[in-house]
């Protein structure tokens, strides 16, 4: 029990450090947000679509936005630690390495959710579609969790390379294809009013992805950062 409390405190310390650093600089969240807003604005003016067609492409546009903005944030979150020498300090701290992983994952998860909280109302206004709905928000939360669970691990691997900005998308995108497809299908199903039985398999895929890849990342993170 004492070890668990120590782990939770270490995770909280890592999350608090990331949030405090980002609050002072606002570098990562601002770049993610600007990128996400640019994507949806470009799609809005580039695709002259009817209202019915816009409803059909909404899920795809949303997840393209979250995926690329999230990759930008993941890359930046680990690059800052590496460039400032903070990563070595974290690894030397007398805590379980899993605390570093979960702390970074939670902070990345919060950053993506913050971007989503701003993107959804802006998208709703531009496309005249109501996206402030609990079912869609649930899919975004589940999808974002799975995305950052594996993304944080791969960002920790890629940060050691010189070509980390290119390497992370190359490593990450093939792995998250099942997650993104399931998230797009589930989001589209809710937006288009499909029956719950048609949407449930896609939700199950997202849940399985979240559990499996969080467990894998937890088990191998120690070996990844050692390298």
Image (cartoon, rainbow, N blue to C red):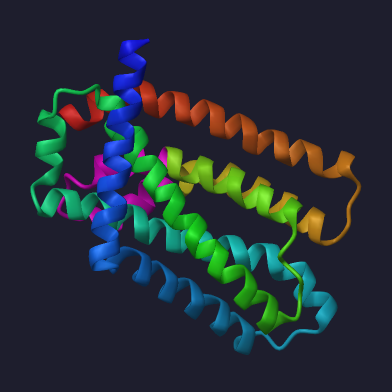
* Residue positioned 56% across, 83% down in the render: 41
* Residue positioned 63% across, 84% down in the render: 44
Residue 171 sits inside the magenta stretch: yes
Q: Quadrant of residue 46?
A: bottom right
Residue 211 sits inside the magenta stretch: no
Q: Quadrant of residue 9?
A: top left
Q: Percent x, y for residue 214?
A: 46, 30
Q: Which residues are magenta?
A: 150-172
Q: Is residue 160 above or below residue 50?
A: above
Quadrant, the C terminus: top left
Q: Percent x, y for residue 78?
A: 24, 49
Residue that extends furthest to the top in the rendered view of this protein: 1
Tell me if residue 167 can be seen: no
Q: Is residue 48 above or below residue 24?
A: below
In this rendered view, identify the residue nearer to me: 170 or 91.
91
Q: Percent x, y for residue 101?
A: 32, 34
Q: Percent x, y for residue 94?
A: 14, 23
Tell me if residue 59 can be seen: yes
Residue that extends furthest to the right in the rendered view of this protein: 195
* Residue positioned 80% across, 38% down in the render: 200
* Residue positioned 16% across, 27% down in the render: 226
Quadrant, the N terminus: top left
């Amino acid at each position: 029990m004492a070890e668990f409390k120590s782990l939770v405190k270490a995770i909280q310390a890592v999350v608090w450090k990331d949030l405090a650093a980002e609050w002072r600089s606002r570098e990562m969240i601002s770049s993610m947000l600007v990128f996400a807003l640019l994507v949806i604005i470009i799609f809005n003016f580039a695709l002259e679509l009817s209202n019915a067609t816009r409803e059909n492409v909404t899920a795809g546009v949303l997840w393209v936005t979250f995926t690329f903005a999230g990759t930008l944030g993941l890359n930046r979150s680990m690059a800052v630690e590496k460039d400032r020498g903070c990563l070595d300090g974290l690894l030397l701290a007398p805590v379980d390495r899993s605390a570093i992983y979960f702390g970074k994952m939670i902070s990345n998860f919060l950053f993506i959710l913050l971007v989503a909280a701003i993107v959804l109302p802006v998208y709703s206004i531009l496309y005249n579609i109501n996206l402030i709905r609990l079912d869609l928000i649930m899919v975004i939360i589940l999808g974002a969790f799975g995305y950052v669970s594996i993304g944080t691990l791969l960002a920790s691997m890629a940060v050691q390379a010189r070509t980390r900005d290119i390497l992370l998308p190359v490593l990450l995108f093939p792995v998250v294809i099942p997650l993104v497809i399931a998230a797009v299908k589930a989001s589209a199903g809710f937006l288009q009013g499909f029956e719950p039985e048609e949407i449930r398999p896609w939700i199950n895929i997202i849940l399985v992805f979240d559990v499996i890849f969080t467990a894998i990342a937890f088990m191998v993170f120690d070996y990844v950062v050692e390298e």
